[in-house]
Amino acid sequence: MNDDTLHAIATAPDLRELQALRVRLLGKKGELTEGLKSLGALPPDERRARGAALHERKRAVEAALEARRAALERAELDARLAAERLDLTLPGERVPAGAHHLLTQVTNRLLDVFASLGYEVVVGPELEDDRHNFGALNFPPDHPARDTQDTFWTTDGRLLRTHTSPMQVRYMESHEPPFRVVVPGRVFRNEAVDATHEAQFHQLEALVVGERITMADLKGAITEMATALLGSGTRTRLLPTYFPFVEPGAEFAIWWQHPKTGREEWLELGGCGMVHPRVFEAVGYEGVTGFAFGFGIERLAMVSYQVSDIRDLFRGDLRLLEQFRGVA
Amino acid sequence: MRVPYGWLGELVEGLPPLQETADLLAGLGLGVETTQHLPGAPVGVRVVSVLAVAPVAGALQRVEIDDGERRITVACAAPNVRVGMRAAHAPPGTRLPGFDGALEVREVGGVRSEGMLCSPRELGLFEHAAGLLALGDDAAVGADLAELWPADDVIELELTPNRADAFSVLGVARDLAAKLDTVLRHPAAGLEAAAGDPSIADGLEVRVADPERCPRFSLRRVDGVRVGPSPVWLQRRLALLGLRPRNVVVDVTNLVTFELGQPSHAYDLEALEGGVLEVRRAAPGERLITLNEDELTLDPEDLVIATPDPEGGSRAIGLAGVIGGRDDSVRDATTSVAVEVASFEPIGVRRTGKRHKLVTDARIRFERGVDPALPLSANARVTTLLAALAGGRPHPGVRWVAAAAPAAPAIGFRPSQVGFLVDVAVPADEQRRYLERLGCAVEVAAPDRWRVTPPTWRADLELEVDLIEEVARLHGYEHIGSTHPHLAFVPPATDPTHRRLRERLVGAGMVEAIGYVFTSEDDLARARAPAARVRLSEPQGIERAVLRTSLLPGLLAAARLNRDASRLALFEVGHVFLDHEEERLGLLWRGHGASSGWRPPQAHDVYAAKGALESLAEGLGADLTLRPAAFDDLHPGVSAEILWQGTPVGRFGRLHPEVAAAWGCGDVVVAELRLPLEARPPRLHELPRQPYAERDLAVVLPVDVTYAELQARCAAAAGPRLVELFAFDVYQGPQVEAGHKSVALRFRFRHPDRALTDAEVDADMAAIMAALRGAGYAWRT
């Protein structure tokens, strides 16, 4: 046994060789094991001296084996780690994120606002009858007010609703006041189609009825909505106008900063007013007052997101739809 | 309607500056669309008289003119140039709108032309280029036209249909004067004396056969009329209104329409057979050529103005309240006219106008309702102007056929209601002043019980709430505060817009589209969707003639549009129109699934699409199964009915290759489901405390036996300890008999309370295998 042994241990090329060395030296029949076993046959003096030397030798071999094992294991791990290296700058494997339609996002944002203000969301049919779309909303037959809502009539005498207001009638016919409801939905006008006019578009309409709802409550509701959308300090403006189903009637605007021009200006958003007594009469309500307000979703969406052609919203073009990814 | 600011200022004392006036109008509910500055005549243009006209070549003429200082020669091709006429001359050096630089002396066809005679368009005054601006004697030769025709501003109003009273400069002025509490100068004030005496015969006769449709009719004779160009101020006024001046008679009737809001018409007296004018229903098939040269076939519901014809019949010469006829208009040679000013019932006028698709200044006013007190004073206004401007001599008599005017009913009004409804504090006496300034008569029966009679021009005021709006409007909506009502109302937590559904689909990487409800019969047929049930009576073209019966045609069109996209996963939530309107979810998949671009992507085939539906159902807590079934639009071997919680809700499958080819949309997988998709409320199950025992079995069975059948057979045979069963491999190929497939199943058994013994599980498996053997299936070992 000499330094060649320690050299062999220190230069063992891998863990298998090292294990073989361990067995050869320290196994049951290993050189050192045999040497230690043979001590018993020696005279006491010689046994002590030889024993001490052998134990010394064993500790040295064990230490060398352990050192070499640790070194080899580290080298092996380093090799594995080097082999496992990946280029994480390559693209990941994924399903592209989905997207709500822009109009759904804007509608959802508004519905969240109204939900927080205690409104119930209700929806209704798109194919309507004259009574719900016009008659019960105080549009008399042959009244010029009907010209302001160019109507798609069907060959069987029905119509595509020109506004979401028929739901006012439908809701009141089946519910008792007080209530707060908000109605999102698709509406239709038989108008020439161009970049800012479509034959179908979307509206959102709110209706609140109770024992004494006032026009100041109306203004408060619009201001709350505008504040929720645009932040505190938002101003709102009412100007008199005419819709057959409200009286007094108004158009409302909110003071905002135009996202494209950066200019602060009035954004004329929609119509509003106090529910007309004839509408209450048509649904059999007595002794209550209420307000309604509504506006177009496309207009708000288009000015907010700078969509220049309304028709692009309905083409199903992925290049446009995918731009509105994200959680609505 | 266009309202010239200068004109408004003549009617309203102390009218504020333009922008302030526009703001006031908006605050009154007379919506201001724009304000426009219209320039006057260009500097340097002068009034000239035409001395001589000599033809040169073609239309070109050498024209000698007098500009008050000297004789000038110009070249001119205008058809209306006449010796003796007054025209507008732009001398060299003048700058005209739309021309680059200043005019120069030019040779035109051998004529040395010093400047030019101008058309209204060349002067930038109004849209008429077919002839020279023709001026009347009021324009002095040599006068500077810019002084006669200065610039002005025009306020363009977008009027709501209820405000019939505001379709005139008078009406707008009236509202402003009420708001400003200032004096209104009525253009027809003091004309009562000039209205004519109905008891004096004038050789005219009016026969009103339908007094309901024509409750008032006045006809006034004016002789000695000289038909020629109107004075500059009148031409300018019409130009500001957006009208083209014609001749003084027509111009005066147009002016009064816009000034007072009362349409009128002047007939050449010679056209009235025997001086008789009839107001009657049209005969079936009767024809009329209008002023605009439209030839109309009339309907018996149409009300016409007619005159006897020499054969003893009667011929229509105008469509009452809508448009006059071509053949009875005033012409240059006319000397005597009959001026008609009448009231026509709104609905009749509206129906006639719609029937013949005619929108005229007269119709717009009559269908909204013209002040019933106007006809006689408006007639006096027209005839007085004809006397002043056309040398006419109004006859002292007037024909006046009128049913007794119904008295406007008084409206009960409680001033307390203004505070109650609008929540603004307006003292009662102030409310009274507002109403009176608007022309209402107020009678105070008790402190909170008034009787308010609206003026004749405000037929829109019918209810107390209308008066509340008038008070609020005059007071100003800007005084309304912002409050929040306390309502005993708690909204139910519903999801009628299917937000949870949409969010799950978007979360799964799907993109939402919104298509059109309009489609064509062709597209429905091409998509093999049900035939249209709902058709539009006046569609915007054949492509939009019917309502969709399925969401798929719209999604297929989107797939075609996006044909270059390697991956497509679209959905739409929308209504379809069958025997009933119903809401649906449509889905479309094409191309690969998850991908990186640099490794082979995951296949996005039918099973991936089905998996997306399964995830959706799982996420909403519902059971989803597919039951193979055939649908016209789907691949016959890859189509199924969708059962949601056991109920059929729609279909799923690969689009039929013929349909895919017809749309050019590629190989797509589609699904369409009826909404709402009911969700199952979650219920907590006790957590299993025992491990399960697992067994695998590869069953060999004919290929046409479905997995669902195999699964059902196993489950039925196994008993309650089988808690889970799924396929982990499906193989078809040389290892199994032809026409057969191998389905490797994994079974999991569990007892709720204790561990199962091998013997128990073996017994269950034996039962399953017995059942499979009974069905004729084998297994691989």
Image (cartoon, rainbow, N blue to C red):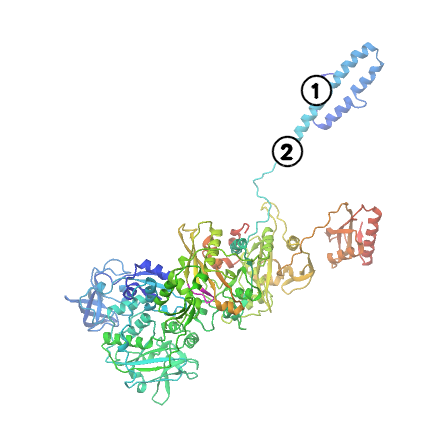
Q: Residue A71's x, y, as percent?
A: 67, 26
Task: Give yes or no for contact between labels 1 and 2 (Cβ–Cβ under 8 Å).
Answer: no
Q: What element carries label 2?
A: helix
The amino acid sitting under disc 2 is Leu
* Quarter that holds the N terminus of chain A: top right
Question: Which of these two is toward me, B716 or B398?
Answer: B398
Q: Quadrant of residue A179?
A: bottom right
Q: Residue A42 carries which label?
A: none
Question: Which of these two is toward me, B181 or A201?
Answer: B181
Q: In this view, does B369 lie to the left or right of A76?
A: left
Is residue A246 shown in magenta?
yes
Count neighbours of disc 2 (C-alpha within 10 A) and say few if under 14, some if 14 to 19, many if 20 or more. few
Q: Which mark is residue A81?
A: 2
Q: Is the magenta stretch mostly helix, strand or loop?
A: loop
Q: In this view, does A53 lie to the left or right of B654?
A: right
The amino acid sitting under disc 1 is His
Is residue A107 shown in magenta?
no
Chain bearing tag 2 is A
